[in-house]
Amino acid sequence: MLLRITGWCILSFFVMPLWAQNDTASLPAAGAAVVVEAARTLERVKQVAFPVTVVNGKELRNRNADVNRVLDALPGMRVRESGGMGSAFEYSINGLSGKAVKFFIDGIPMETMGGTFSINNIPVNVIDRIEVYKGVTPAELGGDALGGAVHIITRKDVYSFLDASYSYGSFNTHRAAVSGKWYTPRSGFTLSANGWVNHSDNNYQVWGNTVEVADENGRPIAGNHKYRRFNDDYRAISGRVEAGFTNTAWADQLLLSFTLSHQHKGIQTGRTMAFIYGDVRYKEKLLMPSIRYAKKNWLVRGLQVDLFAALNRVEGSTIDTGSNKYNWAGAVITSGVNGELNGIRAQKSLYTFTDHTRMAVAHLGYQLLSGHTISLNTNARFTTRKGSDAIARAEWTIPFREPQHLNKIISGLSYQAQLLNGKWTNSVFVKSFAYTAEANVYDYNGGQQKELITYRTSKHTWGVGYGTVIKPDANRQIKFSVENASRLPEAQELLGDGNTILNAPMLQPERSLNMNAAYIQRIPLGKQELNLEGGVFFRNTSNLIWLGEGDLFGTARYENINKLRSMGIEASVAYTNKKWLEVSANATWQDVRNRQRYTTSGARNIVYNDRMKNMPAVMANAEVRLYTPAAAGKRRISVYVNTHFVQSYFLNWPSLGDPATKKRIPQQWVQDAGITYAFPGNACSITVECRNLLNKQVYDNYLLQKPGKFASVQIRYFFSQVKHNQ
Amino acid sequence: MKQMFKRTSITACAFAALAFAACTLSCSKNDSTPGASSDQHFTIAAWGNGDDQYVASVPAIMEGSLTFKGKGIEVQGSRYLHHKQYVYLMNLPEKKFIQFEMHKDGSIQQKAYILTDGVVPNYFQSLNVVDDTTLLVLGANEGNNGVVGWARISTTRFVVKDKGTMSVPATPGVEYYLGKGFVDNGKFIIGGYFYDNNAKSYVADGVQALVYDYPAMTNMKVIKTNVTSGGIGYDYLHTLDKDEEGNHYFVVSAGKYWTGTGGKSGVVRIKKGAAEFDQDYFFDITTPVGKQACLMGMNYVSNGIAFGTVQYEADMTSLRDRYKNIAQVIKMDLRNKTVTVMNTPLSPVGMVRFPLVFNNKYYTGIAPIDGDAFIYEFDPAGDANAFKKGLALDGGGYVQVQLIAPHPVN
């Protein structure tokens, strides 16, 4: 197996690749052409042979929205957040969730970049577009995405510009972002930078079950009292500088970049709001230098190459040295406790982990004939985690103090053929997944007492896939794709997160057969347009990697669920009157079931064929957006209102227990609204928004309440060398 | 136009299918209404897979079957107690101590709960009935440094009547862990075990219990017997009981995987009114049963006969094996110190937290992890085969019984 892995690596590294810069290679010279090219890129992505939804970044830039919120409104998507800004979140696409959904930025996997540089922190005004692949993902992305992939492509504007925005909102929430680029066409020298600062007190009100304060008799004080979160503040700052040359004869891109980010936050709760932490803090730093080289027609005509290499260092510290226990009123109810984390086994801790990751991504594409392209890519990551605990008393930190390792090499070879004058596109790929892991657990190992055990795992699997798209005419597309692939455990799943997620060294890779089919219809009606899309999906998954429910200690760990079958339908409709109106709606129904007939001990599984616990079946979104009539091609005021619906679902297996007594995540139906005014010239705009207008109690996870009504105002300024509609 | 109609009709069909699917989402049938024909109902609490736990009533304990499909209150319990018409449960994930009331008609419902944070340190770890209307609960932080908390709870009003702290032994590095206790003759006597946090091992220096003045909960005194070495009165198993004469019996667990160092497990006694161990009494279970049997729990039935459970440490490689098929039911003659291993299947029965003694019979749930599961009835008058299979538990080894409790009757 080692030989196979090495072979793939050597081959891939010598023949290396590219990725997202397809659209930068044919760079237009100025504004109008930029718009046309951007539109073409969007259309080109939509027409790939895989199920993909594309979000145009330009349409987001005047909205005070984070990426999670934008993507949660897409069909088949579900983003589950555990709280306000900076809280943990999880994506689910067509029934597969967690780390099965991978995130990429400009073709680079984001999972080793730490929490500060997470997708939700990236300001929307640095985004060119977001591609969401559902289920089957193209081999070019180079990862082991099994449930789908979210690919953020940052702006590649070929002119100098400055874009800055600032917003202020409820809960003392501030977001500031600035991005800019200086480009000299003659030499190709390029200097770009972007940065952002996010801050929130996250002191929103919570109430209901487990958000209670006891009276002198130990009974909850009567009435529906609301309490503000008091240890949930969040601050993140991130900056990225890139320098090098672009659009020269010898390189489409040669860029050195340096990314630095930092976050500091309070941890208010454990896995449910019953675990109230008043003093626990978490801080994290990321340092990542990287280099990228990309070139079309490299050495020979038709050959594209894109090479990326990075070293990153993530250091995270959990500070749990408090001696008090708090209630939801923020009052100390007990003193002299030994820390707060880990429930009944709390012990003070000062745990710090340091992840060192070496990463290389290489992509090679070659156009054999017109319409026939072959590409090869490899993604190799080697992560070592070291930990320390200055106090070294808490049992939960014992396995984290010794070094742990996770190495992954994922390679893919794909071939794409466009036939019948481009009306029929076929893509076939094969992927290789290999990983080795060395993780620790503190457990019984044949002896009387627990001991530190190191588990060493090594796996290699293959995956294959096929996608096709038929375009009978310019307005119709029929898509079908299938893959049988794996995804490997991620560092957080295997090694834990150092506070509420424990390590799980015996996790097995997840494997799934994914099938998607979709029909897309565009109906032009003069200045109006109707777009319809319907799709079905099927997943047969084994060893689903799943974050288990919170245990008795306020912590949880990832586990494998042996067999699951998912199927579902999604549909969307969008109507546009180009002068003044956009209306869109989508809905998803999914049926995810446990297909494990017998438990691992051999007993009959009484939840066989049960719907998957802790997963919704129905989701829907709708939005109406109005514009003032365009004046000289400029829109000046836009107003929107949208709504978001998620059906209620059970925390545990639905068939067990009396439904009236079961723990459930309540139905979610919230509305947002906003208005944007763009000043003449379109360089400056002001946006006022309100999310969760009716201040409804909203949960994505059991007993982890999300923020209520959130109002904000944003101002944005954009300046560029060329006249450009932003 | 016609073409457009065709195209859009496909989408319309998709929406129709979506709407149909949405309208036919599964809903489990609510089947919690008890049978009306039975005079004596029972409540059974059980763990399913993982953290799923359910409490449901049945109209009979020796016939029929129980499934938690669509039935039972979903709970999360770590400590169980039955007293009179109430079942109590310590819900750790929600930090609530919950009182459920069992009714004559077979129904059971949550009556009230206490928020445990701030009442005693950590959680309600040791639950004890000290009189007809009072529970004494105790809790301690890890690393308690010689101080634990107690609270008295009125079962009628279900409120904390009073609370405080009390001293426990504190040796550097060695921590005392709370066990079960009882009140007799103005004293509160509690078991427990000792653990060396540095060596990560149990410490067993004879058998020790703590004695306090009651109700003051002061004036701690350590009492000891050297008949064996091990922890006594483990907190979440049924490890303390008394006979018709008012003598109390503590389970001594001396297993290397369970509060001891691999010595002899058995039963020790504190006579009625005494605040010392009966130095002449030790009922050795390990030697006659063999296979390094560690006594886990016991329930006194009558006339000196008790039933208990042993787990065979010879069949174990670590503590986590306690949820495998390594335990069995035994009958104990406390007077004559004879033990009979019941010919029941091996199972994790040692982990059943609150078995039942009812109408002079002993009931527990036996659920081999790879086999069928039943409530078993044991007759104290019979031999090793004097047991019957009763209520079948749907799901076999998937379901592990934690508590069996009788409802009040007319």
Image: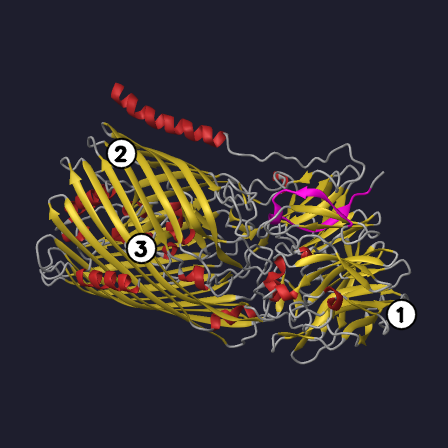
The numbered mark at residue A143 is: 3
In the image, taking residue B23 as reference, residue B226 lies left or right, namely right
Depth check: give the residue in front, A640 or B38: B38
Q: Chain of mark 2?
A: A
Q: How many marks?
A: 3
Q: Between A524 and A532, which is closer to the camera in this rendering?
A: A532
Q: Secondary structure at mark 2?
A: strand
- The disc at residue B274 is 1
Quadrant in the picture for residue A370: top left
Q: In the picture, which quadrant includes the N terminus of chain A?
A: bottom left
Bounds of the magenta span? Answer: B386-408
- Describe the element under mark 3 as helix, strand or loop: loop
Q: Going from the N terminus, do you reach mark 2 or mark 3 first?
A: 3
Amino acid under disc 1: Ala
In the image, is residue B400 part of the stretch drawn in magenta? yes
Find disc 2 in the rendering and name its residue.
Answer: A478
Percent of width and height locating residue B318 = 59, 66
Which residue is rendered at x = 50% and y = 58% of the image?
A557
